[in-house]
Amino acid sequence: MDAPLYLRPRVEPPLAALLADGPFLHSLADGLGSPLNVLLPEAVATNAARFRAVYRRHRLTGRVYFAHKANRSSALLRRLAAEDPAAVGVDVASTEELRHALGCGFTGDRIMATGPKDAAFLWLAARVGATVNLDSPGELERLSALVRAHGLGRVAVLVRLSGFEHTTGNGGAGTRLLSRRSRFGTPVRDMEELLSALEHNADIVEFAGAAYHLDTTGVDEKARALEQCVLFMDECRARGLAPHTLDIGGGFGVGYVAEAEDWERWTTALTEAVLGVRPPMTWRGHGYGLRNEGGTVRGATALYPAYRPTAGPGYLDEILSLPAPVLGRPAATLLLEHLHDLYIEPGRSLVDQCGLSLARVLDVRPADTDAGHHLVHLAMNAGDMSLEEHGVLVDPVLVPRDETAATGDGEAVGVYLTGNLCLEGDLITRRLVFLPRLPQAGDLLAFANTAGYAMDFRAHHAQRQPVARTVAVERRGDTWRWCPDEDYWPITPMGGAVG
Ligand SMILES: *Cc1c(COP(=O)(O)O)cnc(C)c1O
């Protein structure tokens, strides 16, 4: 039997207490079925407060916009709607998300509309006074035409930039590098068309500022983009425009794995397994992007850096503190000097520690791997728990039905977690997962920290399997209260009449 390789999840107080309450989790799953999503609305408010603390530390003004696409929940949105309107808003990327935000209590002035937009989305955003984060010059034309045709009020717009260039080496003689390509936004070099369109339409759109969203963990790349936007806004001011807001998007990240050593051991072992110098530790030798070419490891892992020393608010602090490459002063200082408002659009990091996903163990049997591994068959499929889809790997927590059984002799076992679809590929993770003991039918596995993209982003009705219900929970004295996600309102008692 191989030495167990753990990827123990990072769990903090409210989520840790919830995970520790086996009887409560079992009673929820008994009543509501498996899979089941459990959310902690208070935790999203705590996260928003932590981001606000970073603003205060740098004396910055502006709003934190929750990127709604990370989770469909009403409870989370309503809890955020209850926060200070000047401090917390929501970023919506579809007409339905916009309708949902309005129905959860966000007024239009706290809403940012991003992504490519059709006419209905543009009309509703303009009608309710949302800020429109413009994706392209064409979108500006369509928005202006709509506002004119329907006699709508002046609309605040941000222009989303992409394709930032920078120069390495001294005196500009170095190589010109382009940041990662994006199919969103307008390349900096094509801004002229957009700016003149903004000037021509100044009576119907208010040019509020610049925006970007880079899907990367690279702090330097983000700091460079921030500075380029500040410089771009200087140019805009020089030609008589008056932008005052910089929106640096999301992507502040989450640390999923508690211990750096777990992550290092596991990734090292993956490389060794791909080379064939240790036994496979993934289903059918899956390499997560790595492959063995004549004794050399090639490729790059498609994995999220699951252990992160700095993430979320701490990562924002880092970006703001980093000296800007051209101007030399920290990003926060640049913003202060210019009196720019700072907008951010955190998704994943704002719902860090906000929930978990439960799956019932249906069946356990030996796997055909000759290594003493087992298959653990779950009442859940890969669509219900798509951490793996996002390259995030972390161990589930075993919540035994019979707690006394858990105290027996603890010998770790390696298992593969299979889903409830009749598809060979329906594995919750292709990783060999080590559990403290072999689970039994009726036990629960709890996947911690799934609120960001994992619990409902890819949920589907294939094979008519049930899609997870979602409940909101809150600690009251020494018991938990719960209500269906859609019945939660941020008032006392929790969920209004329910609870
Ligand atoms: C997805 C997205 C975000 C949120 O990204 P996270 O990595 O979840 O923080 C923010 N802004 C835009 C425009 C996005 O597309």
Image (cartoon, rainbow, N blue to C red):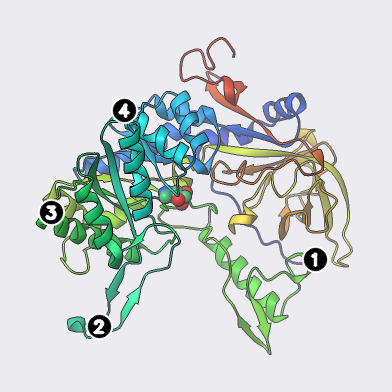
CB under 8 Å between discs 1 and 3: no
Q: Position of residue 198 (x, y in %)?
A: 23, 50
In the image, taking residue 101 as reference, residue 299 lies left or right, namely right
Q: Secondary structure at mark 3?
A: helix
C-alpha span from label 1 to label 4:
56 Å
Three-letter code, disc 1: Met
List the residue tagged with mark 4.
85
In the picture, the disc for residue 237 is 3
In the image, taking residue 319 as reference, residue 283 lies left or right, namely right
Q: Position of residue 117 (x, y in %)?
A: 45, 45
C-alpha span from label 1 to label 2:
52 Å
Please report whichever mark, 1 or 2, sits nearer to the chain's N-terminal start. Answer: 1
List the residue tagged with mark 1.
1
List the residue tagged with mark 2.
169
Between marks 1 and 4 in the image, the one whose residue lies nearer the viewer: 4
In the picture, the disc for residue 363 is none
Three-letter code, disc 3: Arg
Please tell me which residue lies in front, 370 or 321.
Answer: 321
C-alpha span from label 1 to label 3:
67 Å
Please report whichever mark, 2 or 4, sits nearer to the chain's N-terminal start. Answer: 4
Q: Residue at x 33, y 51 (%)?
A: 316
Q: Position of residue 360 (x, y in %)?
A: 78, 38
Q: Quadrant of the N terminus?
A: bottom right
Q: Secondary structure at mark 2?
A: loop
C-alpha span from label 3 to label 2:
29 Å
The extreme top residue here reads 497
Q: Position of residue 103 (x, y in %)?
A: 47, 24
Q: Residue at x 57, y 74 (%)?
A: 300
Three-letter code, disc 2: Gly
Please tell me which residue lies in front, 396 or 38.
Answer: 38
Q: Secondary structure at mark 1?
A: loop
| Residue at mark 3: C-beta within 8 A of ligand 1 | no
